[in-house]
Amino acid sequence: MARHKVEISGVNTANIKVLTKGEMDTLFQQMKEGNPFAREDLIEGNLKLVLSILRRFKSRGENLDDLFQVGCVGLVKAIDNFDLSHEVKFSTYAVPMILGEIRRYLRDNNSLRVSRSIKDLAYKVLRLKEEEYANRGVEMSNEEVAKKLSVTPYEVVHALDSLKEPISMFEPIYNDGGDTIYLYDQIEDKKFSSKDFEIRLALEEALSSLEQREQYILDERFIVGKTQMEIAEELSISQAQVSRLEKNAIESLKKILK
């Protein structure tokens, strides 16, 4: 199959090398021993990980060159903080950090004005979650974060939600080859009751309580429409693991929403 040349930030994606696990382990060991070239080789050998994450942002109209560079910052942070002794695959460790860096960039460039105190709390939450994930490999729940920061779970959810990127009313949401349906076409829905709104809020809060990797899998499976095998390749884990994580996430949602 021909390899198509696509350039992002001057990088020819067709020529990016993909490292094997053995090569990765060797380079991390060399970097630990002070080899000045090992770090660069690790960065270049994992650029496709950044590219795979960028796919989910393609439809949002963002500058992919900018997002690629921001994603690379997350990749470098992951490389600098990765510990082989934890026996976790690098991709499993790096994906949340790269995603976090891109989302932080998008929030910082948000055109809406957000209260400084709310924004500061959101960054404290993100930083605490990242630190705990780096140390333990486990995503903290919003309840745990709230207790640690001496705030309520609602304040945690509200702070994170306030930094989400706004969506234009003219955002196209459907096109079957005919007339495009835009978001503003769907704003007024007389069938949508206050109870439906409460259910949606409850679902969003329940989703936010899941581990970041579980949220990512549900998003990619049911929003983007990827198969379990595609997600498994992206995260460098088995299809069985993806299936188990997906099942656990759904069961967790059922328990929370009962």
Image: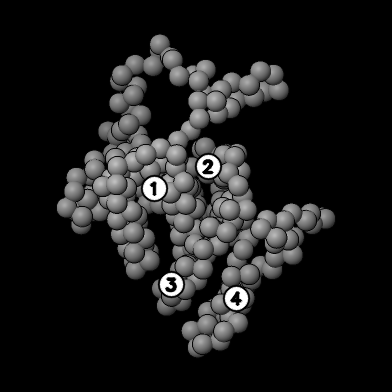
Q: Residue furthest right?
A: 2
Q: Nearer the viewer, residue 228 or 180?
A: 180
Q: Which badge, 1 or 3, is on the more N-terminal residue?
A: 3
Q: Nearer the viewer, residue 5 or 86?
A: 5
What kind of element bears circle 2? helix
Residue 152 visible in the snapshot: yes
- The amino acid on which the numbered mark 3 sits, given as a three-letter code, is Asn
Q: Position of residue 207 (x, y in %)?
A: 36, 41
Q: What residue would you read off at disc 1?
A: 248
Q: Which badge, 4 or 2, is on the more N-terminal residue?
A: 4
The residue depicted at 47 percent of the width and 73 percent of the height is 80
Left or right of 127? Residue 143 is left
Q: What residue would you read off at disc 4?
A: 40
For discs 1 and 4, the disc positioned in front in the rendered view:
4
Q: What residue would you read off at disc 2?
A: 221
The residue depicted at 40 percent of the width and 37 percent of the height is 112
What kind of element bears circle 1? helix
User: Looking at the image, do the residues carrying marks 3 and 4 touch, with CB atoms under 8 Å apart?
Assistant: no
For discs 4 and 2, the disc positioned in front in the rendered view:
4
Q: How far is mark 1 from mark 2, CA to CA?
A: 14 Å
For discs 1 and 2, the disc positioned in front in the rendered view:
2
